[in-house]
Amino acid sequence: MPKQTFLNLPDEKRQTVVNAAIDEFAEYGFESASINRIVANSGISKGSFYQYFEDKMDVFKYLMDVIAQEKTEFFKGKHPPSPGQSIFGYFRWMIKTGMEFNSTNPKLVKAIARVLLSEGMYYGQIFADVRKKTMDTLVGMIQSAKQNGEIDASVDEKVAAKVMDTWSNVISNSILEEGMQKKDIVKWVRAPKTQKYIDDMLSIMEHGLRNVKASSSDDDGKEE
Amino acid sequence: MPKQTFLNLPDEKRQTVVNAAIDEFAEYGFESASINRIVANSGISKGSFYQYFEDKMDVFKYLMDVIAQEKTEFFKGKHPPSPGQSIFGYFRWMIKTGMEFNSTNPKLVKAIARVLLSEGMYYGQIFADVRKKTMDTLVGMIQSAKQNGEIDASVDEKVAAKVMDTWSNVISNSILEEGMQKKDIVKWVRAPKTQKYIDDMLSIMEHGLRNVKASSSDDDGKEE
DNA sequence: TGGTCATGTGACCGACAAGTCATACGACTG
DNA sequence: CAGTCGTATGACTTGTCGGTCACATGACCA
């Protein structure tokens, strides 16, 4: 957690520092991110940095808090299409709404994703915990989906959770990576072609490669 | 490519250097791998290193050559279950045989996979090319599978290729990660439980999460 | 006015990195 | 024998890193 000094800062200055940190992690990942560059790019002195944060991990954890809070805030205003939705419909809504969120702050999302999904794999407990938490949520979803008969009882829950987690990440990443090169990422994400891509991927996850009921003519019709 | 000096080295010494490099990349990835540590661990001097290789990338490329060659060699002695096999049967054979190969030299495989799949994503052309090549191969497989009617014509080939590539990597990685902690990785990979895990994952890829025909009672019976 | 307290600063430190180079060694050769 | 060629060496240069610290600044108060 950042020190009090940082939280006392005027909003604008604090935001400048945060932005510099986001840029740094998004471009270099965690290991290669340089505090020297962060201070240079945010126009504060080295000494100040260490009066704001303990160290590199401290800034990064702060960014994780920021994104978690923003995401909660964002999802608070959204509602799943219909309660009691099938797991697949719900998952599709999650992914699509998640992508809407991602396009509101793509750099931050990219920075976090990059660190968590690449280096995080080899970086011990801190990040492993975060990933475990999402897995547990998924396992919960799958268990109730099994009870509804949407997913066959013979399927190993962990395997299924891994499948869904993998897809979620793959879809997010590829959308984000490509979208960040467009001039208007929000518009691009909402474009039919992009939405179809997401639908296709999820359809394959649901029905398999062998026999895909593609063409996204499934159960949910409109977004808000 | 390494310089001639390196190729002139006695086998044993050359292998020592290669092993030190593999260990380094497997443990630290590419960016954080240290030439200083490699030379320390291989008992050669800094000067010698630069008489063997141009730089860090040069050693790594050499390792990629080594693995490519070893893999070709390994697969030369193997034959797909039956020619004209379904794409899914063939893919399963590929994955399983690939895992057999991986367990012959897990450290090397891990080193390469780590760099290619994590940092490689953000590392410009060099690694992108390698990944593109596998994608192209997969697209080719999918095209002929479409003609056989095994995969629906409406499926986007690139999407499908991405699906298969993702699966291949996820399976390899999770098997490797867990297997390297066992005392006898070869034995562990061949164990029924591990094989079932692979089958389950592939079955989900083939038939989807919604309605899995799991329990690995498919078409191929034995490995040699 | 002088004191104190939060904040800001950048020179400085030791560690480590990549890469260079003068020097040395030993085998072979004329 | 002297010469030279391939190889080996590690001290050295240059650069960046994370982190510290003595000091400066300025707002507030007694």
Image (cartoon, coloured by chain):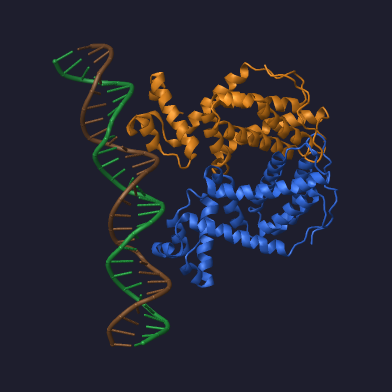
Chain colours: A orange, B blue, C green, D brown
Residue B152: give x, y in percent of width and height: 81, 39
Q: Position of residue B42 (x, y in %)?
A: 47, 63
Residue A113 placed where, x, y %?
Answer: 56, 35
Which residue occupies 74% across, 36% down? A205
Left or right of C14 on screen, residue B60: right
Q: Looking at the image, which residue is at 54% across and 62% down?
A: B19
Residue B185 visible (yes or no): yes
Front-most of residues A108 and B83: B83
In the image, residue B190 sits, relative to residue A204, either above or below, namely below
Q: Is any part of residue A126 visible from this angle? A: no
| Corner quadrant of residue B158 | top right
**Residue A90 image position (x, y, % from top left):** 72, 25
Q: Is residue A10 left or right of residue B170?
A: left
Residue shown at 70%/55% (left/top)? Answer: B98
Q: How many marks?
A: 0
Where B163 sits versus B219, above or below?
A: above
Q: Is residue A50 above or below residue D26?
A: below
Q: Is residue B40 left or right of residue A161?
A: left
Asked whether B134 or B9 is in front, the reply is B134
Quarter where residue A183 is shown:
top right
**What is the quadrant of the C terminus of chain A in the image?**
top right
To which quarter of the image does residue A68 belong? top right
